[in-house]
Amino acid sequence: MPSAGSEDRIAHRKHVLSIDLGSGGLKTAIVADTGSVIASAEVPLTTHLLPGGGAEQDPAEWWQGVRQTARQAITESGLPPDDIVAVACDSQWSVAVPVDDHGDPLMRAVHWMDTRGGPYNRAIANGFPRIQGYGLFKLFKWLRLTGLAPTMSGVDSLGHVLFIQHAYPEIYARTHKFLEPMDFLTSRLTGRITATQKTMVPFVVTDNRRWGTTVYSDRLLAMAGLEKSKFPPLIANDGVVGPLAPSVAAELGLSPSTPVVAGVGDSNASLIGSGAVHDFDSIIYIGTSLYMTCHLPFKKTDLTHFMTALPSPFKNRYYLLGEQGAGGKCVEFYLKHLIYPNDAFATGPKPEDAYIRFNTMASQAPAGSGGVIFLPWLNGALVPSEAPHARGGFMNLALNTTRHQMARAVMEGLAYNNRWTRRPAEKFIGRRIDHFRFSGGGALSDLWSQIHADVLGVPIHQVDDPVNATVRGAAFLALLSLNHIVLEDIPERVNIKRVFQPDPSNRVVYDKMYRQYRMLFKKNKKIFKALND
């Protein structure tokens, strides 16, 4: 709640109701045009893990969470409705939501961790001659038109739609439109079903050669065997969906004229909310997932390392997709299943300060974790080498291995994957990355920041208030779309808390551990495939 003395100071500011739908939880915040979060509220989300590689979430739970957290954040902000000039949504993506003509979901959303579409993607990608599992001529068309190709693992939205088409034909037949989560939320907020070129990328049915296209590609739809009518009309990448629906405005206590801007993926929102809006300014983000990204002035694809450049909200610009898979989810797995399990070995419920305890434990182990290596591919590997059968684990455990070492090994394992990703990323963008901004919940840890500096051998710039990077980025985009700020305002409104320099004394051990990390991936690929095919 703003203090009485701050009322005059904030009266002239513009504020955005910013909604961040992540994999593990939903956060709604009131963000000022300075980038400061005035108030926020969040709720956890349930991911239903199913046999055969299934992973689903309930869109009704998302919407209920939005309504609950939005009311709470608006009330706690103490702002009058007219001071909130826009609503913005960012979300996890590569998540398929089938809805009817009223916008109501027909089933649980098929999540980005879901691999059940893999066989169908592989079937449509097959052909002769083959390269890396793809028919060469089909691959050329996909890469030329979209900048990417259907994943072999089926974790993209195209794979999810094909899975629904084959496994649930009655739901497919009833589906009016397939949406990504951010577009589902904007449809709920406005009553208008839309999408953009940038949000529909995971369906692999839009031509991304021309930034800002608002039509689907008949050629891509034919290659996928899907109907154009199943996909929503496209608006401008930086467009406005419409005003709040009157009933939603009344429930939230906002003006019905409040505009809702086009949604954006959380990876792009976090990049902007970390202040990295200029070309080649790079970030490492550790939330539920792990990724490395930056803005680019060109479109390009590197299929070997599973990297591509996707349309950004900024006109005629793209951003690097360096999605590596599970990030903070690895920490959650470690705490939930090994430290605080709900089973016969139960040690009690996970305490609220579990992540602080995790960090404290990890800080008590030496660099290199006593030779323990953690493999973070709990749901398969993506960048820089797609391997849908790969899985995680601790390697080189001994009788004297401690939980201190295992905790630190989780942190180091993700840092090793970032080191592995860095070189192909530098080749992709055509220049050396001499430092990274570090953002997301992982950047709250000074230890993890230092580990990344030591493992990657470059300075790590720890973003201030990193857990709000996504809501801050979505808010900045809304303010840009409505001409309340200009692009150059953003970097100066995101502070760097601290810069971590590499510690040369750790270089030898981390070089050794990294080499073995890479070798473990290479040597175990056949074993992973045999176990998880």
Image (tube, rainbow, N blue to C red):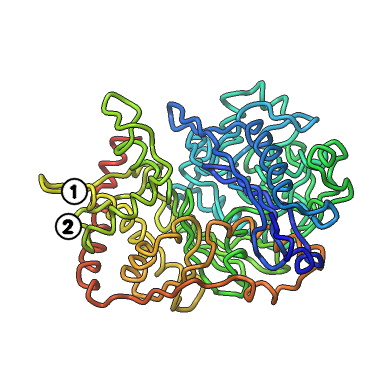
Q: Is residue 101 above or below residue 483?
A: above
Structural crowding at the residue carrying mark 1, measured as other residues with C-alpha within 10 Å and reported as few (<14), some (14–19) or many (≥20): some
Tell me if I can see residue 518 in this picture. no
Query: What residue did someone put label 2 on?
Result: 370
Horizontal side, residue 513 vs residue 232: left or right? left
Residue 517: tell me if it is visible.
yes
**Label disc, if present, on residue 402 of the rendered structure:** 1
Instruction: In the rendered view, tell whether residue 103 sits above or below residue 453.
Output: above
Judged from the image, the secondary structure of the residue bearing numbered disc 1 is: loop
Quarter the C terminus occupies: top left
Q: Nearer the viewer, residue 4 or 77?
A: 4
**Observer-nearest of 6 and 304:** 6
Residue 163 position in % (x across, y down):
56, 31
- Residue placed at 21% from the left, 48% from the top? 395
> Type of residue at label 2?
Gly
Indicate which disc, 1 or 2, sits on the residue closer to the N terminus. 2
Secondary element at image label 2: helix
The single residue placed furthest to the top in the displayed view is 170
Q: Quick check: marks 1 and 2 in contact, CB under 8 Å?
A: yes
Amino acid, disc 1: Thr
Q: Position of residue 328 (x, y in %)?
A: 43, 50
The nearer-to-camera label among 1 and 2 is 1
Which of these two is toward me, 92 or 133?
92
Q: Most extreme residue toward the left, as rendered?
A: 399
Residue at far front of view: 4
